[in-house]
Amino acid sequence: MSTICPSFPGAALAGSQGCGTGCAGLSLVELLVSIVLGLMLSAGIVAVYLDSKSNYLVEEEMARIQENGRFALNLLKRELALAGFFGGNPGIAGFSPAASAPDCGTAADWPLQPSTPLDILDDYAGGAIQMSSGVRLDCVTAGDLQVAVDSDVLAVKRSAGEATLRDGVYRAGVTAARNNQWYLRFADNGAEVSWWRQGTAPASIPAVEVNAGGGTGIDYWAAYANIFYVRSYSVDAGDNIPSLCAERLSGSGMLTRCLIEGVESLQVEFGIDSSGDGVPNQYRTTPTAAELSRVVTARIYLLVRGLTPVTGYTNSKHYQLGQTAIAARHDGYLRRVFSTTVQTHNALLPVI
């Protein structure tokens, strides 16, 4: 820093009083230059901060998309893998539902009708939920008036993968039937079949059918009926968060429950075995009722988006979900396609 002495009348006097020994200060030019450099440095720091924050938000959204997509894919994969599995009893297809079975709108006793364990509506376009089998599932639109259009509706019926009670012995970690849960009851080692809901008569599994040492010949398998679909909101209508939801068998009716946020589109293609060798000969998005009984594989496609738009980002990408093309949204949401293929051999239920 240079030493500057003022240039004005009387400067000599000022100098005689000590200017020559060190009058510190900045010229106007130096002051302006230092201000400009400071502003440039501040602007650089702000730019780095904003860029880091933007990258963090993008990474956070992608991580959320990844988590939600994988969870949704694994959920549907397990459902389809178990579709048509009813305690390992292949003769269940011809079994009648319980007299007290709940309905799905006009579809009487539908949740406990095992003859059609797998069903689909391709690209819902509004109005009634008319499935490929011909059944109309009004319980979906009755509970949810904002089912997303151009997305599939998938119905799956099955039992649990493991018995609640097997030969009189409770599964590890289980000591009683679940409240309001429907069960398939197999007696005489599967020769006798009946439906039972916990809380009805009898109010619980009879003690005579339970034996820690086994040998009773009594099995109880939890039964499930789920209708999966995408709706345009998550919790409150208008929150603009698309979600994967399900209409689920619960006690005396069907209960709406949203499972995973961010799912924008669900597409399923069924592999049809027309030659009887267990290998799909074609994939159909709209199988007939007859083809549904010959489904051996299913391809699942999900389009999942972030929950928060990214500032300064415009998504102009087109997405291909199997045979379905989805046009660009031109908004600020990140998106990703998830897909998998699953075998559905349990859906081949012979009527005995």
Image (cartoon, grey):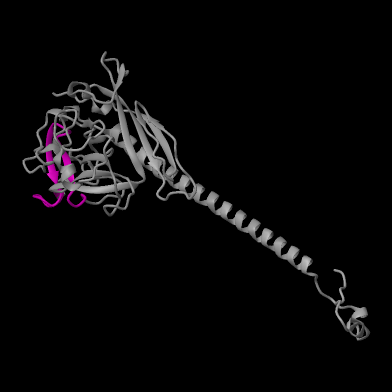
Looking at the image, residue 96 lies above or below residue 53:
above
> Extreme left residue here?
99
Image location of residue 62, percent across then percent down: 47, 45
Magenta residues span 177-206
Rendered location of residue 98, percent (x, y):
9, 39
Residue 66, image x, y percentages? 44, 42
Q: Is residue 237 magenta?
A: no
Q: Quadrant of residue 162?
A: top left
Could you tell me which quadrant the C terminus lies in?
A: top left
Q: Residue at x 75, y 63 (%)?
A: 33
Q: Is residue 27 above or below residue 337?
A: below
Position in image of residue 92 (x %, y %): 16, 30
Residue at 86 percent across and 73 percent down: it is: 4
Q: Is residue 300 visible?
A: yes
Residue 114 left/right relative to 57: left
**Quarter residue 265 falls in:** top left
Is residue 195 highlighted in magenta?
yes
- Nearer to the camera, 312 or 58: 312
